Amino acid sequence: MPVWLTEREYLVLRAACAQMMPSDQGAPGAEEAGVADYIDTLLGAFTFDPPRIWAGGPTSGRKGGEAGFINFHSLSTLDELAWRMRIEGSLGLPERGFNGPVVGLQEKYRQGLAALGADFAEVDGAEQERRLRADEGFCDLLYGHCCEGMYGAPEYGGNRDGIGWAYIGRDGDVQPRGYSDEDVSGP
Amino acid sequence: MTDAIIIGSGPGGSTAAEVLTRAGWSVVIMEKGRNHLLDPSDLTKPASDYSNDEIKFMVRHFLGPDPLIEPRAFRRSADEGEHTHVGEVNSIPTTVGGGGTHADGKVPRFREEDFRLLSTYGPQEDAHVADWPLTYDELEPFYTEVEKAIGVSGRAGANPFAAWRSGPYPMPPGAPMYGAVLSAAAAERVGLHPYEAPTAANSIAYDGRPACNNCGFCAFYGCPIHAKGDPVALLTKTMATGRAELMAETYVSRIRIEGRRATGVDYIGPDGVERSMDAGVVIVAGGAIETPRLLLQSGLEHPALGRHLMVHFQTIMVGHFKDLRLHPHKGRSVTHVHDDAMIQDDRARAAAAEANLPWIRGGLVEHAGGGFPIGEARHLPWGRAHAPAMRDAQMSEHMWVFIMQGEDLPYPTNAVDLSPSIRDARGFPVARITYKPGRHELAASKHHGGILQSVLEEMGADWTIHTSSPGVPEFGDRASRIPESRHVIGTARMGDDPATSVVDRWSRVHTLDNLVIADSSVFVTSTGYGPTLTLVALAARAAHHLAGTAPG
């Protein structure tokens, strides 16, 4: 069940992410990594307490140490203002529109996914690509989030089990292990 | 009444706080950002909020400022109108610890001639080139004191051009990065003089903090194990004296001025309520953009205030090596640098003559690589080509980069003032930056970029690209027109003449008896070195002068 998107929007988003990062010739794609869940979690960050904005520290537990990333940071009043502006938009509220109206990510996704069409998940790949490329602004926004959901820390909802890092041969977070001096200085 | 209010908890403010509390002063440190540096239950110990997390630090503004809450306005010159961009511009963290938290800790000293630019080289058209009102020799004991306080690793004698020093570095250098081993060898073969970068990261356990374990999340990240000393070492010591109060999420809206005295500040705390506090001395350490912003907002007037903004015009020379895997994500971001681009030789003199300039100076050259996965992915196409391109890792494994922090001349037209229309979330006008490189910076980039290209070719590059930050048509216009340098310098210059300088030789505002600036605003010239160690040494010197104490 998606956190913030409707079931239909979620299906369209999954198909759009899979078009951007397909599973192909052994490479994991957006589908296996759960990239759409990363985006849905961001859009619905304020349905969690504390909000899913900043994962905790100092270690994830993947290379030793405690699993601290799952303890998301609480937000200050101003942090919450910033992230509500970014996610929900200014919504006509004077305390959010002090430099003019702000269009939030929720509205951008709601409109962008609607423009892809309710049948987006059912049409063929060539048609999906054509529809994605028709809106350059939304396409850039979506691709940036796909990159974060594929290669960011799994605690944010994507990169399931570190599958994105594993495919490209990166270790992700490495504290408290770090690297040896030989790792740093040798070929 | 507290002896001093210090505005800003970055390297400059922390240093002033440490020196003054050691001398028995009481201080209140007001920091508009949050505290993620010190343990909230015991401020004499570091916190555990930092992590190896690209989303948190590179995407979601964990260290601040959030550009929606406190944006900046930007234009290249006054003929572009009010501004051409609103958002992030030269953003140094707004958080307890300030810019020290995210820097990779390169802390070179300046050299003797850097304090005597006008006497050594002579004037430049359109720029206010000047000597500093102090010499390297006067600053040396303070350099020595602060290197010990923050913990600097390096090797005395490694840089043949370095100024004299009264003792060794507190720690030996850390492990050299593989790419830097190769680029340093190539640089030596073409006659340059690379050396181990003086770095405020522990190569051995030091002062109760552990040795760096090479995690690679250094530049732009807070250190999860606090192996970077600046400014955590200064702030934990300050808090341990029991004579300091740290007020985070506290925004100073105005310095109260009566006659020749700063009597205190108006501030807004985390509860949003505006209050006032009196102090014997007010020390401003907001950095070379926020400091002039606050002084202008407080009604201070001076023809040089906000002028001569310098940011280091960055020359970025990229080389591609198809057969090497350079793994720059392992290690301290930068382990080697060279000074040769600041040294005058026949080729530099010829390049200056060709550009119809009396002289040109480049800057410190960092031997670097880079590329975290999200950052690299954004440069790649989507679709079926994406995964193979990521696995290929052309950017993060096969590129090596020279970044020259080129000396900006002090032009009065490059400046910080108050935006006429853009506000921060608390309702105050934000800083507007007006900046573009001049003929000197472009000529230096062209000349030294050519030399750096030859080093990459000697190292075996199959292709190279010369680019810059900010992007300019001369070098392909590839990068953003908004400068990305975090070295902000020179908007309240120091001097003996109150008509042409904002502060005196002790960093005190000429027209006020008790208002001191403790950041790189006071620099007269930018040199080609990162400003941190010098601003920290100047802050220590100013604080010792206030307290009547000597460094040591």
Image (tube, rainbow, N blue to C red):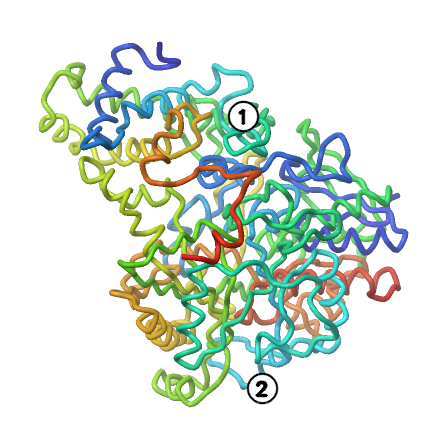
Secondary structure, mark 2, is: helix
Secondary structure, mark 1, is: helix
Name the kind of residue labelled 1 in the image.
Glu
The one nearer the camera, B285 or B527, is B527
Q: Quadrant of residue B144?
A: bottom right
Residue B463 location (% of width, % of height):
25, 65
The one nearer the camera, B248 or B74, is B248
Q: Is residue B166 left or right of residue B174?
A: right
Name the kind of residue labelled 2 in the image.
Thr
The residue labelled by disc 2 is B120
Residue drawn at 70 percent across, 56 percent down: B150
Residue drawn at 32 percent across, 52 percent down: B395
Residue A80: mark:
1
The one nearer the camera, B15 or B504, is B15
Q: Is residue B211 left or right of residue A108?
A: right
* Chain of the residue that carries numbered disc 2 in the rendered image: B
Image quarter in which the C terminus of chain A is found: bottom left
Q: Residues within 10 Å of mark 1 (few under 14, many from 20)?
A: some
